Image (cartoon, rainbow, N blue to C red):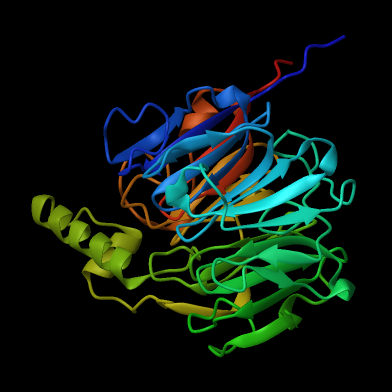
Amino acid sequence: MAKERHGTWFGFGFCGFGQVLGSGNGRHSVHSPEPLCAGDDICRVSPSWSYTALVTRGGRAELSGSVSGSASGCRDAWASEELLVVLRDEGGSGTELQAWTPGSALQGEPLWVRNLVSGAEDQGEDEPSSEARAGTLPLLPGAHAYVNRQPPFCQPLAPELRVRQLELGAEHVLLLCEAGQVFSWGGGRHGQLGHGTLEAELEPRLLEALQGLRMAEVAAGGWHSVCVSETGDIYIWGWNESGQLALPIRSLAEDKKTVSGKIAELNEGCLKGEEAAMADGGAPAPFIAIQPFPALLDLPMGSDAVKASCGSRHTAVVTRTGELYTWGWGKYGQLGHKDSSSLDRPCRVEYFAEKQLEVRAVTCGPWNTYVYAMEREKL
């Protein structure tokens, strides 16, 4: 019998509160992927801004960062600055949904407890790339409600929605139903709902621009949204302040213009193509701050996407061939390109290609990124 293969979790980006991001070594940021300690024993990662919740294959939830602590018997954990939610097995009595203040370190009494009917949930396998999404927090087992950061903490969902996946942004919610259609609601002031306006929506509203296209994955950033179709296409919309939509932004263009000007001073006449056009004050680029409708995004080399995750202002996508592309805000190294530059175009994280690692999953925190990868099988 072949030995079961497990991959390893890697982290990069902001770790100013000491949250686990590889070795860290006391730094406030990690600019290139580093393996997490005991990364091969971790099956789930849920990062918040100041701390990260990890769940091991043995069912132990561990907190790292501004708060620390652990608890056994956990199947899932969901971290936010306002609330820490864990799904725990309670012996033969079924499963409990427990909500804690993050500062409690999972000690004492939770804020509230909800008993779930035994057998009503299916968390999928420990493998992070498992396609079984229903029941993954913040979506509750059974997919009839979800956990909210603010009261009321448990929000019901209409049964007819038949929810497959649910993701929370800073002010909005994305929902993927079993039929592959996308719904959004909540705040819309940055176009993150995708309905063509900046208006809020109180109830789930079908994303008409994507109607008829079957989606396989959704991801909610701080104020932007991404979805991946069953055929591997990427659709993206919302706020583009840091290039998180992979659309041109003024700040990066001005940086390029400054660099081009310096090059011209050092070696006059050597500028070509785009740099020359910028230096000569050519036609302005179509800078985009807000994209209120879904826009189709092509990855380099025509790569197909299978998974996506969003941070506060950055985006990460896993391709069908196991490569990782990132773009957007990069101040703390959360893009994984060995620097703190921001990007308004998808760029491959070379670390995993150089190490012959196949990326299987990605989970973005607000200012950092966690990646699950395995050694590529030798042919």
Q: Residue at x 18, y 57 (%)?
A: 269
Q: Residue at x 15, y 57 (%)?
A: 264
**Camera-side residue: 14 or 158?**
158
- The reply, left or right, for residue 212 in relation to residue 258 is right
**Camera-side residue: 53 or 218?**
53
Give the answer, above or below, for where 107 lies relative to 37.
Answer: below
Q: Position of residue 174 (x, y in %)?
A: 66, 69
Q: Position of residue 256 (x, y in %)?
A: 27, 60
The outermost residue toward the left is 265
Give the answer, above or below, for where 335 lies relative to 291.
Answer: above
Q: Position of residue 202 (x, y in %)?
A: 65, 86
**Camera-side residue: 257 or 226?**
226
Q: Position of residue 160 (x, y in %)?
A: 89, 75
Residue 279 falls in image quadrant? bottom left
Q: Residue at x 49, y 71 (%)?
A: 223
- The reply, left or right, for residue 329 in relation to residue 245 is left
Question: How many marks overall?
Answer: 0
Looking at the figure, which quarter contains the N terminus? top right
Looking at the figure, which quarter contains the C terminus? top right
Q: Is residue 215 visible?
A: no
Q: Is residue 173 visible?
A: yes
Give the answer, above or below, for where 224 lies relative to 72.
Answer: below
Q: Residue at x 89, y 51 (%)?
A: 120
